[in-house]
Image (cartoon, helix red, strand yellow):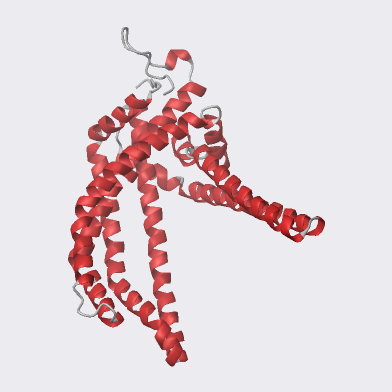
Amino acid sequence: MEERVRTYGLGEMLGTTFRMTGELWRPFLVVWVCLWGFTGVFLAGTARVLPGIMRTLVFTGEELSHHYDRGLDLMQAVLAQFGRLWVWDLVLMIVQWMGTLVVGLLAWDHVHRAEGNLQGALVRVVRALGRLIFQWLVMAGLVLLSLIGLGVVGAVGGFLASLLLEERVATVLITVLVVLLVVAWYVFLVWFLVAVNFSAYAVIFEDRGAWAGIRRSLELVSGSWWRVFGYLFLFWLLVGFMGLLLSFLVQSPLSLSLFSRILLSPDPRNLEDLVSRMLSFYSSPWVWVGVWVVEGIQLIGSHILAPVFTALLFVDLSVRKNAPASDVVEPEAGVPPEGGDV
């Protein structure tokens, strides 16, 4: 089938995101169920160890003050449990990341070829996994280097200020310098995250290398940073509000149940009784079922709708940057242009 791509305005992009999610609901449902199921496995493991970690953390200080060796043993046990949870959390993050990329690839294929081959999309993502992980490490390294660079600038500036100026003036200037550097780093971080937002998609959509994917994302966002930032911000504002609203309806009964257990304690100053009540709450399977439901709701926005929207934005930017006019689907007569900036 001939590939025909087009540009999108914000309103149409949002509408197309929901429409495409409906058209590809079968493969998306499979991805969502897999991610939700894997999240449930992680939560089940957390539910088994979290009460013990909470109890240990509360009473470790007392054990350290009375029985030093016993307290150290408790701390080592807590660190070991946290280590296992961290490993599981890392695995969960990678699985969810891969699911997001599969959804984005399905959306991209649907735009270009009206296909929805879940197996083919999964194979392409798995084959590109090495490049994607290397790309993530490169971007993390660039962020770390920027932080180190600002730290060096701050250290040199502070040393020169303390060497050349009076103590009081130097203290004020160093404080101002630190604040400005922190603000500058956060500004850079926001710019960088938006600029490389399409790096992974460039790897799997266009079969690029890790560094080439980063360059491609920078190329697409160049000259359109504010537009991309605004689109992403408004999308996450909408999806985040919907997710929070639905999650609130599920979490409210759980929160009320926890607060009622604490407030109904006969002796609020009895730490052991309060901890026991909290542990009995978190040991209830219904609590974790509620958390699981909330996670499932949030996965719809963050791992289904978000990659579809990002894939459409990738297509839009690619058309504006590269596609010849003959490949762009023009709006019908009498219909306002759909690719204008918002």
Vertical relation: 290 (above or below) 9: below
Question: On the rendered structure, is 158 left or right of 92?
Answer: right
Q: Quadrant of the C terminus?
A: top left
Viewer-side residue, 128 vs 251: 251
Q: Residue farthest to the right?
A: 164
- Residue 285 place in picture, x, y as percent: 19, 67
Q: Quadrant of the N terminus?
A: top left
- Residue 201 place in picture, x, y as percent: 45, 38
Q: Residue farthest to the top?
A: 333
Query: Residue at 38% of width from left, 14% of height from top?
Result: 337
- Residue 172 place in picture, x, y as percent: 68, 55
Viewer-side residue, 235 vs 34: 235
**Res. 209 in view:** no
Determine which quarter of the picture holds residue 59: bottom left
Label total for image: 0
Viewer-side residue, 260 vs 210: 260
Determine which quarter of the picture holds residue 242: top left
Query: Residue at 23% of width from left, 34% of height from top?
Result: 22
**Res. 264 in view:** yes
- Residue 98 place in picture, x, y as percent: 39, 48
Query: Residue at 40% of width from left, 86% of height from top?
Result: 62
